Amino acid sequence: MKVNGILSTIFIILLLMACDHPAVPENAQKEDRLPRISPDYTEVTIPCNICPLNFAVQEDVSDVVAKLTYPGGTLTYGKHQVVQIDEMEWKDILKASMGSSIQVEVYGKTAQGWKVFKPFNIYVAEDSIDNYISYRVIQPSYVAYEQLSINQRDLTSFDETEIYNNMSVSSEGNGQCINCHSYQNFQTGNMLFHMRQGFGGTMMAVNGQLRKVDLKTDSTISAGVYPAWHPTQSLIAFSTNKTGQSFHTKDVNKIEVQDTYSDLILYDAEKNEVSIISNKLEELETFPTWSPDGKKLYYCSAHFEYHQTDSVLPETEMIQRYKEVKYDLWQADFNPSTKKFSNFEKIYNASDSLNQSVTLPRVSPDGKYILFAQAEFGCFHVWHIDADIYMMDLKTKKVQKLDAVNSPRSESYPTWSSNGRWIMVDSRRDDGNYTRPYIAYFDRNGKVHKPFEVPQKDPNFYTFFLRSFNRPEFMKEPVTISVQEFARKAKEDAIPAKFVTR
Amino acid sequence: MRIPLKYIYLIVFITVAYLMLPVMNGDYLYTIQDNCIFINGHTFMMDIVTHKGGWIMWASCYLTQFFYHPWLGSTILILLWTVIYGATILMLGIKDKWSPLALIIPCILLYHLLDYGYWIYYAKIPGLPFQPTLLVLICILFTWGVQLLTRPLKVRWDTKRGIACGLLLLLLAISHWLWPTSAWHYNYRFCHSIKTTLFDKNFKHELRMYRALDEFRFDDVLGEMPKDGEDSPTNLMVLYKNIALMHTGQIDKMFETGNCGIKPQPNDSLQIRTSQLGGPLVYYMFGQMNYSNRWAIENSVKYGLSFRNLKMMARTALFNQEFEAAAKYLAMLKNSIFHRRWALEHEAWMLNSTNFYQSVEYQKLSPLLNDDENTLNGDNGLCEKFLLEHFSDLIHANSPLLEDVIMCMSLWAKDYYAFCIHFYNYVTNHPDAPIPALYQEGAILLGNAEESPITLNGFQFDIPIREKYKQFVQDYYQLRQQGIDEQEMGRRLKPLFGSTYWWYYYFYNDFDIY
């Protein structure tokens, strides 16, 4: 009885602590500006099923209180310099605020007393977002790599799990690099990622069955690199690339990743066959992506003619002329029954008319728009500070820069949510070095709203986390294959793909 | 009153441990701490503790930071060893005369800590001084706990002691399952490097020179360089020494102060690279901010984040005016115990640019930032080679310091083609200024070479230097006619010509860049 009493008291205390809502300070002095908060959630639009937007107040204050006013009432949060919102209460707040907004008023305690900053709004869209995203967690190194993982994150909570971790098979002297995870139609039954060096090969789940394939053939320049699953068939378009990297002594971009050669191939997962999509000698084709109906393939290509002197290797010439490499946007028709491509056509001439380079195209789920990253030159825009996100209306071919999602730092790897209402980009706006996923609302009128950084439970997480989130992808469901299952398959020999001519 | 032997043995052990740790190897312990990191806060903790053995690793990292003051870290470590000693005696009921047996584990732990040598730059064991100690301590305390819990059982004491001993040995044997892995590779082993740690003078010089250079104490760097005729320095020591000369306006003295480095070869299993030992600092000191930043990050990725590399990342971000990145790194450093002050000092640079421009670091490094426009290339992991080639190939030196640097680097690299061009530009740019003796020595030697792009015959060189060169040539050919091999010739000519460029040019042919 006595023990029960003690336990009950402890439970009540814990419950009270969990629901601790600070009082709104009285007689606070008004500050006529928005508070500096991190992440910056001021005036952002969020989906109705996102997890709490916890933030830190970056003002010279010792304590904070955030008053959240929403259609259902008012709640307060805050302790020291951080605002962490109870997950259950946040769900109620979102439910009540759908199609409306939450007004946030931040109070900060200074030596002179409390002050209150200008309130800001968080707009809650009626549109939801895919429950999951996945990304590669990697230190933004140059050549070295060590621990890499592909993780999946539940956007409705703070739960994050590993899909695959290279340390499960890597050993000293036999390290493994992993990259380019990709899914068919936002679902995870058909998915893939590459493993390089130790236990190398392309790891695929085809209809939930794992296989490890070697996509390098005698007739292609490399194994598959940038992938794109066909939306309805077991086909994957890949680029094949001979990639190198070199380093700037002064430039703020620090590094150039360049393809000396690149082509496009098609992999038939049912027949384990590789065929050529495009391998023109003076074109560097890369970054394939399908239209939602699977009848068109979009990709990028740079026209580049080597001078072909005996004394200069192509790799060296590519380094010397790195600013001349500019990619345009192309499309090709695809016949799913014959698996043949035709009518290769340049649809956006960025290189000649704008002196720009287009990379990483992604078509919206309704097939009306195509997003891409654009910068002055090159193919690896994550390292280009001038890289921004643009969008083309595929009917009018009109291109617009998405000012709302861009920043003075690099933006790259744009992607759409499955309902086409959310755009996710990889941005280095926080500090210039570490890519973070930002999500922007794309409303029914085609307007793009201010993006928000994917929330973390610890508001200071992004400051103290020295790894990048690369290649963020939306998923409707989590990957259910375990790390151990992937690791077991990784240790097996890769099945060589057959090359066929179409 | 008779003092029990176990206390005497303990006092002897503590004394020896103190002598071996902070007294004799304080720089070694400081460097271990500098190559480790601990940041207060949830993110750092979660990044570590989610891995196998993560809590031990986290606790070890926490304790390792106290080696910032080697005596403080050593005191904590010796205290833990004392607990291990005492617990072993109590648990196993070791008699007084056999109490030295309980010192076996602390002695192994002491040996293990001193066994790293150059491995301190490569071992992927965050908090390496404390990890084995904490693990052993957990095993002992667990065994002791089991023994105490089973006390009421009616079993003979000797049997209980035997079981405890067996359990402890078993736990120690299987403890590698508890050992931290994943995040940073488990790489525990005896490195067979205790000789390096205890007796390799160059290893110790390098540790001290790095710290002095990092703190811009150039005179201390020069003071660490062995005097001529003493031990041969390593290439890295030569590099550190020349950096100190460069920043004290004496770079033309590089061949007078010993420029013939050797490659350390502590053991066969370790491939030593300047890039890991001091690459980021060396690049920083030459004003190569991107390369410094690159190697600070690469080394952090490969061998684990460290205070040393995080500070370098913050510094290069400040010089590159990447203030958001600098703020991030400084915010992390501000959440440490002993590097907080450094972070606050450097944060002040960011908040007030006047502080930055008036800082010693900016004053010293800014003349090197004015070099040619951006180039795209790579160093293939060979920091020294890159610097020699980069500065030798630099045509337009935009500051007096840079003029001297490119001259000296081309001499150092024996790049007569580049030197001749630099020399011609130098004397053209300074028609009335005296030419430093080193440059004259270089010009006399290289100006007449067949491959030289410019004939330097027309320049007026100082008579004593010309005469000395004549003497050198004469002695050289004389010895050669006598059939004396190169090595012996070098030895015989060293007293008279050892400080000249000519001697370096002819007799230093084992430039093993690593």
Image: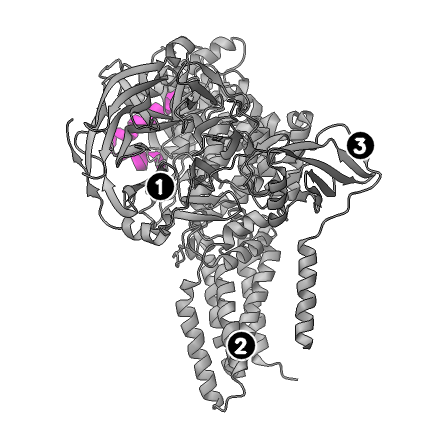
Q: Amino acid at mark 1?
A: Ile
**Mark 2, secondary structure of its residue:** helix
Which corner quadrant holds the N terminus of chain B? Answer: bottom right
Name the residue nearer the viewer: A187 or B270.
A187
Asked if the residues shown at circle 1 and circle 3 are in contact, with their CB atoms under 8 angstroms apart, the answer is no
Chain letter for the residue marked with disc 3 in the picture: A
**Residue A191 visible here:** yes
What numbered label is drawn on residue A178?
1
Quadrant of residue A280 in the image? Answer: top left
Chain letter for the residue marked with disc 1 in the picture: A
What numbered label is drawn on residue B145?
2
> Which residue is located at x 54 percent, y 17 percent?
B399
Tell if the residue under mark 2 belongs to the same chain as the one under mark 1: no
Where in the figure is residue A330, as x and y percent of width and height? Answer: 32, 18
- Name the dominant secondary structure of the magenta segment: helix
The residue to which callout 3 is attached is A30
**Mark 1, secondary structure of its residue:** strand
- Pointer 3 local density, CA inside 10 Å: few below 14, some 14–19, many at least 20: few
Where in the figure is residue B31, as x and y percent of width and height? Answer: 52, 48
> Which residue is located at x 56 percent, y 40 percent?
A455
Q: Closer to the observer: label 2 or label 1?
A: 1
Tell which circle, 1 or 3, labels the residue nearer the N-terminal end.
3
Chain letter for the residue marked with disc 2 in the picture: B
- Placement of A115 over or under B252, stated as above or below: below
Q: Amino acid at mark 3?
A: Lys
Q: Is residue A63 left or right of residue A314?
A: right
Name the residue nearer the viewer: B131 or B249.
B131
Quadrant of residue A393 in the image? Answer: top left
Q: Amino acid at mark 2?
A: Gly
**Magenta residue span:** B469-491
Please tell me whether residue B479 belongs to the stretch shown in magenta: yes
